[in-house]
Image: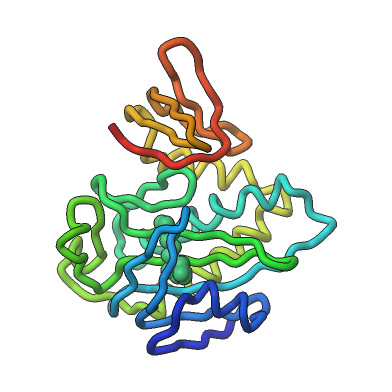
Amino acid sequence: MDITRFDTIDSTNDYIKREKIGEKHIISADVQSAGRGRRGNIWNSSAGGAWFSFCLNEDKNITQEYYGKIPFIAGASVSAVLAEVTGSDIFMFKWVNDIYVYDKKICGILVEKSEGHFIIGIGINVNNNIEAEYRDNRISLYELFGRTFDIEEIIMKTAERFYENYTLLIRGGWPEIYTYICEKDYLRGREIKVINDGCEILGIAEGITTVGSLKVKTKDEIKEVETGSIIIR
Ligand code: BTN
């Protein structure tokens, strides 16, 4: 696994896309001047966080069913590595690919497809202090544990774990990954609102289906949602 580290770049996802960086080469930045989140959100990327991306080539012999699992693999990899480096089991998986601790987001993941490959962009709040405006719903490892962590170690281990989990997936290991994400399911039992294409579904999160959809118990039925953003009520 190679890593190229920048002091500042616009966005590690955009760099991979622009420079056509191949598999198993991580791009990381101390600061991103135009860090991006999902749904066009800005991702605050000041010094002290782990902001990095890497890519996975699309293989025409592998079905879409596998590629739909990439967010889960990325989330499961981050959660396992954070548990390993901190020695703590508090990291929960929020469908479809955030990591939460005590009701606050510690990691966001942006998976994008570009010309025959997937770009996996991961942002983990590590040694940074969360800006005042986000403190109600975000947290960093430093704030949780009162000490700093080795950012490069977290980045390398996460990318390695991702490729290992991807290999596991295409060799039939989804049940193992699925069991793990169900154990770490942050939303289960919570009252949520799912927003998808302007539609809203209100209900209780009832777990994740074996194909990776979110089960939501509304007042009259159980809906299986494939995509959407989640608001906890
Ligand atoms: C989200 O929760 O909305 C996803 C956030 C993803 C942020 C990471 S930081 C590294 C990579 N580069 C970006 O511009 N975004 C991702």
Residue at horizontal 25%, vertical 64%?
Answer: 140
Q: Answer whether residue 79 is visible to the viewer in this image.
A: no
How is the protein colored in the picture?
rainbow
User: Would you identify the image quadrant in which residue 170 lies?
Assistant: bottom right
Query: Dividing the image into 4 quarters, which one contains the N terminus?
Result: bottom right
Q: Position of residue 204 (x, y in %)?
A: 38, 24
Q: Nearer the viewer, residue 59 or 78?
A: 59
Residue at image location 65% in from the left, 64% down from the top: 118
| Percent x, y of residue 167 | 68, 60
Left or right of 158: which side holds 203?
Answer: left
Q: Is residue 205 above or below residue 166?
A: above
Residue 87 at least partly seen: yes
Q: Residue furthest top?
A: 220
| Location of ligand 1 given as a quarter of the image | bottom left
Q: Establish if 126 lies above or below 211.
A: below
Q: Is residue 144 left or right of residue 97?
A: left
Residue 194, placed above or below residue 45: above
**Which residue occupies the extreme right position in the image?**
61
Residue at 23% across, 76% down = 148
- Residue placed most toward the observer, 140 or 10: 10
On screen, residue 180 versus residue 167, left or right, reads left
The picture places residue 44, in percent across and down from the top left corner, at 32, 68
